[in-house]
Amino acid sequence: MLEPLLAQAWKYDGQVTTDWDRVFARRTRRMKSSAIRELLKLTMQPDVISFAGGMPAPELFPVREFREACAYILETQPHVALQYGPTEGYPRLKELLAEKMQKYGVPAEPANVLLTNGSQQALDLIGRVFLQNGDVVITSEPTYLGAIQAWNPYGPRYVTVPMDEHGMITEKLEEALRENPKAKFIYVLPNFHNPAGITESLERRQNIVELAVRYGVFIVEDDPYGELRFEGEDITPLVVMHKENTFYLSTFSKTLAPGIRLGWLVAPEAIMTKFIQAKQGMDLHTSTFVQMIAADIMERGILRQHVKKIRQAYRERRDVMLRALEAYFPEGTTWTRPQGGLFLWVQMPEQVDADDLLRAAIEERVAFVPGHAFYPDGRGRNTMRLNFSNAQPAQIEEGIRRLGRALQRMLG
Amino acid sequence: MLEPLLAQAWKYDGQVTTDWDRVFARRTRRMKSSAIRELLKLTMQPDVISFAGGMPAPELFPVREFREACAYILETQPHVALQYGPTEGYPRLKELLAEKMQKYGVPAEPANVLLTNGSQQALDLIGRVFLQNGDVVITSEPTYLGAIQAWNPYGPRYVTVPMDEHGMITEKLEEALRENPKAKFIYVLPNFHNPAGITESLERRQNIVELAVRYGVFIVEDDPYGELRFEGEDITPLVVMHKENTFYLSTFSKTLAPGIRLGWLVAPEAIMTKFIQAKQGMDLHTSTFVQMIAADIMERGILRQHVKKIRQAYRERRDVMLRALEAYFPEGTTWTRPQGGLFLWVQMPEQVDADDLLRAAIEERVAFVPGHAFYPDGRGRNTMRLNFSNAQPAQIEEGIRRLGRALQRMLG
């Protein structure tokens, strides 16, 4: 029984003083607020140049097209758009996404597609259906913070594999699989890795798939940025090579707009049943209205045009950032040169602690995310992630100049 | 280690033949598709009169107002509407909801409000933060199916308390609390109960709160229909009497439109931190765009007007259904007379199995939900839930006539 008069354990607007473990589920202890989230609050003052979030350029949102899509849908199908819909997703959008996936060689039919509230919910769904306390998740080092947050409540252990410029190092990955018989899946960010900016080469993808087959584990292929390639050729997705055992996820957040919270999960049909049941218990279904907007925008070819436009803009911003890093950052600092996406990754001299640098940077009115946030074990203290999609080119140049100055000062 | 070559365990578009328990999390076994969901598929043919779902009347949706809200938001604040937002929710909407709650006597500030993807997600959040394998949830009998679906993955045991026309029977509730020291919360649907159509009287509410205090358990107050009262006076919400230990949830799904998937959770600020952390891992935040539409519609007073309109329409539909039940249903059948909401509950003679009746009813082109779906233990085989919000009055009359005929034949 809980303490009688638990009411005394906290105030309505105050602190908890009760025995947490008797009140909350054990998993609740493992929930932590994201460092990025707390930082974003700090960096919302308008005079701070922020390289911190993963936000698209707001001035490029296709606003007029959104307005047209809303008007059209509410004109022609309001009774569908505003009503309950199927858990799997709006049928026409599933068709459009299946076609899109097929273009990349993924043999997806509409029944293989589930619409989610951003790809964050797809990560949660994967955790909910597959992860048991004590399971091992194998992931790159660094890795996407949001995945760790999604999976922590399910109690897995993370085993990390270092990367070089071509992706996860094969020998280290095999070692991790050999040493962890409870490994359940390998988490791969194949294109323009968040936060590292690295793309897995074709050879590395083949190696990952071979190892997944040999050791009998799943692959989770998280691909929010694949369409934002600035140069070079598209590389075959892992799901094409290993379709039965790969769960592929992507999102409209980077290509269209994050404010609509719309992503999707691609999985074998037999497994989809379980994802759909899980999703139903979680929120019944994703907004019909939002799904219809996305379908309309895809159907009219606007998404394709828009992606072209932001690809060009983000390429320019990446180039500005790379040139500014050359100009303003001190010797002994290195960074990745991503072929697409939103982020690059900076390695600073050993003695620099990115948390200290962030404090100095905020005084200079510039922000970034300290790299340790992307290490499940909190290492990587001398690293940072820089976003180049959100700020405009002149701000990027100025922001990197300020950040270089703060870094120079710390190095003395 | 998972079986090597797990790929052989299923086909991309086929069946699973693998050892589920080695592949899936244990909680996945407890996920089941909702009976309603499968039924809705059957009843989507246009000639079926459906009393099955909990769908609002689509012809009453405030479509023009939605169109105006979309245009206005995309005209004035597109960069906010389409961008990432805070996990807690859009600040203005939190303010508006706090004010609305205050009108009912709930001492909520914006910091006590969390926006969710429908109230289904609020149920999931409560389960995620509080429910541990083996915890006991005390609920009415029958109870809302979606809550069971939301909580099943967390492994609670349900202890049910029968109701009479005034709500949960106090002696039985006390018995349940006394016998179940692992009880964590009492789940209460205070107004126009889904599926039973019953409203908890003020005295019963006081009893529930007294017992919750005495036995040190939380209350989950699920109130989607509170604003849809056709007659009589509003009754004080439980959260007003027991604010520190009640989690209150509601939704725009019944008052505005379910297709936007927007609900909210009200909780003490100290606990809110954990709900926000959980929500962040689940999907970062609820659609900014959708939240701004709801805020605009509230701000312009449209929600209030619209609620008045549907209250009147649903009252008429309830009356038509009650009259038709009197006219067409056989002796020995009883039903509730809800003072609001969307549903009424029918008790049929012992020998009737509602699943058999549903098969006969579908031949007559009319549908409902068999009552056992609302019993965690599958009892209640001679009961059914009837929705009166979705079908128009003439259809309701005709549908009840058909259903009465099917029932007469089964008894005959």
Image (cartoon, coloured by chain):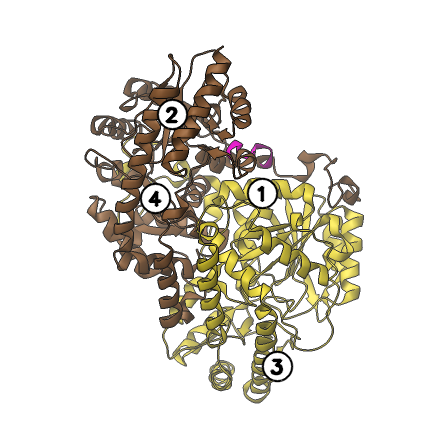
Chain colours: A brown, B yellow
Tell me the amino acid under the disc marked 2: Trp
Q: Identify the residue position indicated by label 1 in the image.
A: B276
Residue at 42%, 32% (x, y): give it: A144
Mark 3 to mark 4 CA distance (whole Å): 56 Å
- Give the structural element (helix, strand or loop) at label 2: strand
Q: Identify the residue position indicated by label 4 in the image.
A: A250
Q: Nearer the viewer, mark 3 or mark 2?
A: 2
Q: Is residue A38 visible?
A: yes
**Side of B164 where A84 appears, left or right:** left
**Side of A360 where A389 appears, left or right:** left
Q: Is residue A92 above or below residue A351?
A: below
Q: Identify the residue position indicated by label 3 in the image.
A: B332
Q: Identify the residue position indicated by label 2 in the image.
A: A345
Q: Are marks 2 and 1 on the same chain?
A: no
Q: Chain of mark 3?
A: B
Q: Nearer the viewer, mark 4 or mark 2?
A: 2
